[in-house]
């Protein structure tokens, strides 16, 4: 992604996660992958879902840290991560947001991206493949 230039603006319609839940009900799982705006999506969520994932990148780790803070405030407390295109979990167990933030901080820049998986307190019994 380094060296890429995106110089065009586009407008897209926006709806909050809470509004989607109001319309369609609570999903069992949600994947958030919105090219660096994951923390802004989570700002539109006011209660924990059973489980969710969000994309992170090593060039915008601060976005991931803000996501972890928001999710912790919402009651999520189990986290794991799949780095790159590898769909295998790194820890194969739920860890704390603080431990995951440390892991993300220590990833080499070349790791590029991945997905953080999260569960809320009442879902910690969910098995990790």
Image (cartoon, helix red, strand yellow):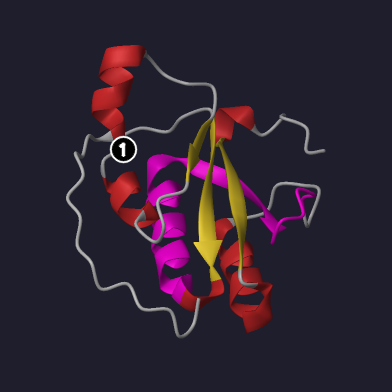
Where on the picture, by quarter, is residue 9?
Answer: bottom left
Residue drawn at x 40%, y 51% as measured from the top left: 34
Of all residues, the one furthest to the bottom in this rendering is 3
Circle 1 packing at 10 Å, graded few (<14), some (14-19), many (20+), is: some
Residue drawn at x 47%, y 63% as measured from the top left: 64
- The region drawn magenta spans 60-89
How far across and how far down the image is residue 54, in percent? Answer: 51, 49
Q: Is residue 47 magenta?
A: no
In the depicted structure, whether residue 41 falls above or below residue 124: below
The answer, for residue 107, to whether it is visible in the render is no
Quarter of the rendering occupied by the C terminus: top right
How far across and how far down the image is residue 72, in percent? Answer: 45, 50
Element at label 1 = loop
The answer, for residue 97, to whether it is visible in the render is yes
> For this view, does 65 lie left or right of residue 89?
left
In the depicted structure, whether residue 47 falls above or below residue 107: above
How far across and how far down the image is residue 81, in percent? Answer: 67, 55
Query: Where is mark 1, residue-wise?
Result: 45
Residue drawn at x 24%, y 35% as measured from the top left: 16
> For this view, does 16 lie left or right of residue 77?
left
> For this view, does 45 lie left or right of residue 112?
left
How far across and how far down the image is residue 8, in percent? Answer: 23, 67
Q: Is residue 70 magenta?
A: yes
> For this view, does 102 lie left or right of residue 14?
right
Total count of labels: 1
């Amino acid at each position: 992604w380094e060296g890429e230039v995106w110089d065009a603006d586009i407008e897209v319609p926006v709806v909050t996660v809470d509004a989607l839940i109001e319309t369609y009900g609570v999903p069992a799982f949600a994947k958030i992958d919105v090219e660096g705006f994951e923390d802004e999506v989570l700002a539109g969520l006011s209660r924990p879902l059973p489980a969710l994932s969000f994309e992170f990148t090593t060039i915008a780790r601060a976005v991931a840290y803000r996501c972890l803070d928001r999710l912790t405030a919402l009651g999520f407390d189990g986290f794991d991560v799949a780095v790159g295109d590898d769909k295998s979990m790194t820890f194969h167990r739920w860890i704390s947001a603080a431990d995951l933030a440390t892991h993300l901080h220590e990833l080499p820049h070349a790791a590029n991206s991945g997905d953080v998986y999260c569960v809320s307190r009442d879902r910690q019994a969910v098995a990790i493949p």
